Amino acid sequence: MPAERLLPTTESEDLIALVREIARDELAPRAASYEEEGRFPREMFHLLGKSGLLGLPYPEQYGGGEQPYEVYLQALEEIASAWMSVAVGTSVHVMSCYGLATFGTAEQKDRWLPELLDGELLGGYALSESQAGSDAAALSTRAVRDGSDYVVTGTKAWITHGGVADFYTLMARTSPDGGRGISCFLAPGAADGFSALPAERKMGLTGSITAGLTYDNVRISGDRLIGAEGDGLKIALSALDSGRLGIAACAVGLAQAALDEAVAYAKTRNQFGKAIIDFQGLEFLLADMAAAVESARATYIAAARRRDRGLPFQRAASVAKLVATDAAMKVTTDAVQVLGGAGYTRDFPVERYMREAKVLQIFEGTNQIQRLVIGRSLRK
């Protein structure tokens, strides 16, 4: 059943109604077959872009929706409840636009941001490396100044949309000065010397491409530097705070889908002469699942409201990401249990939901990193 939402305006209510319609009619019918085939749904991102859903939190003057994060995240949750790969891709695209939209010059935004937001171009976020995951300041990809350009050399790892994105928000080292030596670039998705490694063979989210990137003396124009040299880690971490809210919303959408599937099954599956939902042991399990979903939703919305009001929200974002993704893992696992043997087969979607939930505890900062962020904030 659709989640009950208290939205701030009639405009936002209409927006969520549109997203639900697209999710129901366009995304949900395709999800299972695309995931089974490991097929990347690029046409769905074109659809979302043309529907105005790839730039929801960004200014209208650049083609965005100028929606508060409280509304954008609930739209993202609706997408996730229908198709997780598309929702994660949407969240990554929005995060990939963040550096330009927030730290870019007026000239840079006028030049590039409209086409990033309209769905014609799809973004990737190139921060992680094989030896620089949680420790982002340890990245080794280099960008060396050469006249008015930069020459980039190095390899990125675990990049969503790796090899299919049209642009990447790329973090590269411009000096040896640790975290202060990293800079941010709006890198094109095709250039001499650039290539993508073979896509990862993943446990879930098989419709979403994840691949490493190789930069072999790739020349990037100096006007694609976002912010000043050395601002890259600041930009990256700021983007991740917002990106974690996106993943939290995706997690809640996935958990809601699992809960809905479990409730529907429990109402129709009969044992000992009655529907299994009428047995208190199962009823309590479903109640705990519902409580987890609603608690996680409230947590990410509370964090989004802090962001919308210009209040510090880093800890709130980490709490939301931690709570929501742990909840998704628990709820999807319990959904498999409710369906019993049927839940362990691919005839029902809950086994896919369970596989998809696991990575949510890992990317955009592992949940151990979220605990570190929360713990450090308590010591201040």
Image: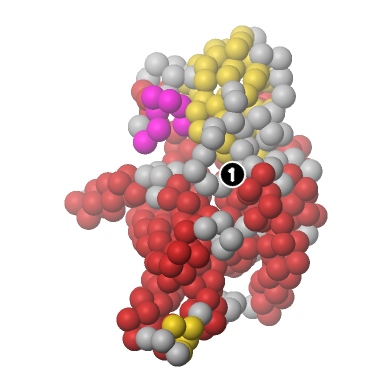
Mark 1 sits on what residue? Answer: 206
- The answer to whether residue 268 is left or right of residue 176 is right
Q: In front here: 379 or 300? A: 300
* x and y, in percent, of residue 270 in the image: 48, 83
Q: In front here: 95 or 325? A: 325
Residue at (65% x, 18% y) in the render: 194
| Magenta range | 126-134
Residue at (66% x, 14% y) in the render: 193
Residue at (70% x, 74% y) in the render: 17
Residue at (24% x, 48% y) in the render: 376
Quarter where residue 319 is shown:
bottom left
**Can residue 250 be seen here?**
no
* x and y, in percent, of residue 29 in the image: 72, 62
* x and y, in percent, of residue 116 in the image: 72, 43
* x and y, in percent, of residue 153 in the image: 55, 14
Main SS, magenta region, reads loop
- The answer to whether residue 370 is left or right of residue 108 is left
